[in-house]
Image: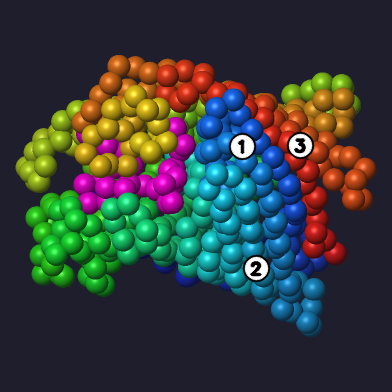
Amino acid sequence: MKLFSLSLAFLFTATLAIQSYSQPNTKFPIVYQDTTDSFIEVLGMASSTSRTPFWIQANQFGIVPRTSPTGTLNIQLENFWSLNSSDQKNKWRIGGGIQAVGNLTKESKLLLPQIHGTIRFKNWELFAGRKKQWIGLADSTLGTGSYIWSNNAMPIPKIQIGTVGFVSVPFTKGWISFNTFYSEGLFENNRPITSNLKLHQKAFYLRVGKISSRLKLYGGINHQVQWGGNSPYETINGKMPTGFGNYVNLIIGRSGDSNVGQENYFDNHNRVGNHLGTIDMGMEIESFSNSWFFYRQNIFEDGSLFALKSLADGLNGIRFRSKNFYGSSFSITEANIEFLYTKNQGGSEFIYGDLNAPRGSLGRDNYFNHTQVRDGWSYYDRTIGTPFIAPTTDTQWKWPKYADSFTSNNRVAVYHLGLRGTFLRKMVWTTKMSYSSNIGTYDQPFPSINQFSGLITMQGKINLFGGTILKGSVAADLGELYPDTYGFTLGLRKEGLLSR
């Protein structure tokens, strides 16, 4: 866990570099621009069972219900304004966004998946609230989602300071850039087991190579901790460790200190809180006609990865993008292939509390479950990480359950293909196809269960309300993990509501 000391290093680097920004290639001053997304969407969906197919509701920021049929009204407004009146550099900006989603179903709900206020200076920002994020080196559109922080759950409300994309390290002329953030957040209070649970989160990534370089190398780490809440398991008076001393401990991934707060035996022989993250690496190769991106995410939850016992586990991916289009009636412009494996977990043996145990005993990682945080790595009963490690509440009725842990199936192997292209020159189509093998957990294994989930979507502009997107999809779940289900969606989307 010594790699967690990177958190201190990247904060120091951030302090030194906060005035830096990528050097322009012209004599003109750089103008900072912000990407925003404002739209209104009406969508209907139905399926052959009462369940919404996997790829219709997974990785949708928690706004698509698992039950069907459903009618949805989705509105998002987002904008930034310059605070500079004397020049056009746009260094200081202030902005905000709100998204409201109303789902009409058996249990109708109004959701606010995004509501934030943000202030930006050059390539740095400070925001508070719920804000959509993708964390880790992976494909965020056609892939399965980053292992630790996909877009499967609603954003967690937090305060965050960090960069907007990659920022050039001073004096490197853009050859070395970094992307970093540091944040603190709060989980929902009506969790099944814990309450008042807090989130500590940070990440630091480096890029070697300019934006225009044909070869770019990436590497970095992200670190998340659930801590400081109330739990009836392995705690003193139902409370997990709190206080500044323990906050320092969890930042650097250190065990509890018996002189700080009221830690118990569990905290003193483990880390304070539930620690999760990935160590990522990637390589991007670009030519005139296409680009290739290769990436790998290595999983850590305890010392197994650092003892080199869980190297088999992780997310592996290749993304291809074509830059040239010749107006053919059918084309494939982008492809993604991924393989996710989590069955190893450092082996089946873990010797609890034995500091002299051999390195080979640091196993049984039990991904997304935790002894104190029994409701696991989740937010409003949605897995925060990969949707292929699903909560027990979202599983087939014949799944075995053990104790009251979050998931009964965290040992999986997933083969995934995602494609995007054009049809008849004006329509865009995408598809996702995933095949998984599932064997439960080390605590409660079950015979291998196989599952296929697929999705095909198509969208194009029509002459309605000055230009509207008509979109639709069909999806299917086939296998033993979820009920066999076929479903579809049909909707209209109007974009650019706040365009100037």
Q: Which residue is mark 3?
A: 471
Give the quadrant of residue 360. top left
Residue labelled with disc 1: 69
Number of numbered tags placed on the structure image: 3
Label 1: element kind:
loop
How far from the left and from the top, in percent, is residue 106?
A: 55, 44
> Seen from this angle, which residue lies furthest bottom?
86
Q: Residues within 10 Å of mark 2 (few under 14, many from 20)?
A: many
Q: Residue at x 69, y 51 (%)?
A: 73
Structural crowding at the residue carrying mark 1, measured as other residues with C-alpha within 10 Å and reported as few (<14), some (14–19) or many (≥20): many
Q: Left or right: 41 with respect to 151? A: right
Part of the protein shown in magenta: 364-388
Nearer to us: label 1 or label 2: 1
Query: Horizontal placement of 197 versus 481: left or right?
Result: left
Q: Residue at x 86, y 39 (%)?
A: 461
Residue that numbered label 2 is attached to: 96
Q: State the CA–CA distance, disc 3 to disc 2.
A: 27 Å
What number is the disc on residue 375?
Answer: none
Residue 42 at x, y = what percent? 73, 47
| Residue found at x 13% / y 62% | 236
Q: In the rendered structure, which disc, 1 or 3, sits on the residue that comes first in sequence? A: 1
Residue 97 is left or right of residue 380, and the answer is right
Residue 6 is situated, as x and y percent measured from the top left of the image, at: 36, 56
Figure check: 290 above or below 173 = above
387 is higher (above) or lower (below) than 255: above
* Residue sitting at the far front: 106
Q: Residue at x 80, y 56 (%)?
A: 496
Is the C-beta separation of discs 3 and 2 under 8 Å?
Answer: no
Which mark's residue is nearer the viewer, 3 or 2? Answer: 3
**Which x, y percent locates residue 450?**
42, 17
